Image (spheres, grey):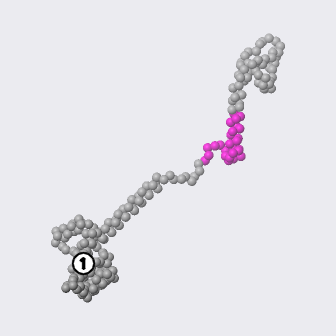
Amino acid sequence: MLRKESVVSGRKLVPSLVDLCIKTTIDNVRYLGDVGETDINLLDRILPHCTIDQLMHIEKCSEGRDLSPATDKLWKKFYEKQFGAKNTEQVVERMRKSSKAFKWIQLYEAKLEDIAEHEKKSVARLKQLYKKEDARKQSRQVQLCTKVPPSKNKRSFCGGSGPGHNVTNLKSNLMKKSKIDFLNSHEMKNLAAMKKKPLPRNGGTSLVMKPAQFSRKDSATTSKLFKPVERKF
């Protein structure tokens, strides 16, 4: 860190050239790349002002130079900030038990790869679940039948089952109903009863009399349909 200016005998102490260079470097730390043979003591004062991306960029650009004496403690702080203090303590405990030491930049990159692999597997699992769900929905959909079943209605004389066919059926039904109503009418019942009644045996011609209960309209209709029956001996 930069030394604070001190007052000696009423005078301000002028910063050294090294302090001015360090301050300028910190202000432009985003432009740093290969630090080359920069003294570790200077890096200890400059690199703490880097972000994760900036520090990683400096590490990659400074190939052949081991920066761990100045950056290892920084990577441990980034690891703890990114993945939590509990996870960091577990890593420290594992290294202690295994008697193996790793650089914190290596541990940080390994953790990122582990997270990326886990996310990749999770995405693949979700895709598989969505695929199964889509297949299940497709199997439950109603399949449309393109084949038209034959009509149950009888075809008319001219063929087809259009409006003319419906009119013909309607007329036929009306004729059947009229015939049934006529057969069940009162005058038809009286006529059937008269046919069952025996005729007199005396000579001459006998006429069958019409029932008195017939109305004018009914008697007119019956007189047209039936004539007096003559019986000769």
Q: Specify the farthest residue to the front.
A: 10
Front-lying residue, 216 or 190: 216
Report the side of 233 relative to 90 (left or right): right
The part of the image, by quadrant, that contains residue 7 is bottom left
**What residue sits 83% from the left and 13% below the top?**
204
Return the x and y of residue 70 as percentages of the image width and height: 23, 79
**What residue sits 57% from the left and 53% below the top?**
146
Q: Is residue 174 magenta?
A: yes
Compared to residue 168, the image places residue 91 above or below, namely: below
Q: Secondary structure at mark 1?
A: helix
Compared to residue 131, the image places residue 109 above or below, namely: below
Say which residue label 1 marks: 71
Report the side of 57 relative to 223 (left or right): left
Return the x and y of residue 130 as percentages of the image width and height: 41, 59
**What residue sits 27% from the left and 67% below the top?**
83
Q: Specify the farthest residue to the right.
A: 204
Q: Is residue 130 magenta?
A: no
Q: Count the marks: how many? A: 1
Front-lying residue, 88 or 164: 88
| Residue type at tag 1 | Thr
The part of the image, by quadrant, that contains residue 49 is bottom left
**What residue sits 23% from the left and 68% below the top?**
88
Q: Quadrant of the C terminus?
A: top right
What span is in magenta? 150-176
Q: Specify the farthest residue to the bottom.
A: 17
Taking the image as drawn, is residue 73 in sight? yes
Q: Quadrant of the N terminus?
A: bottom left
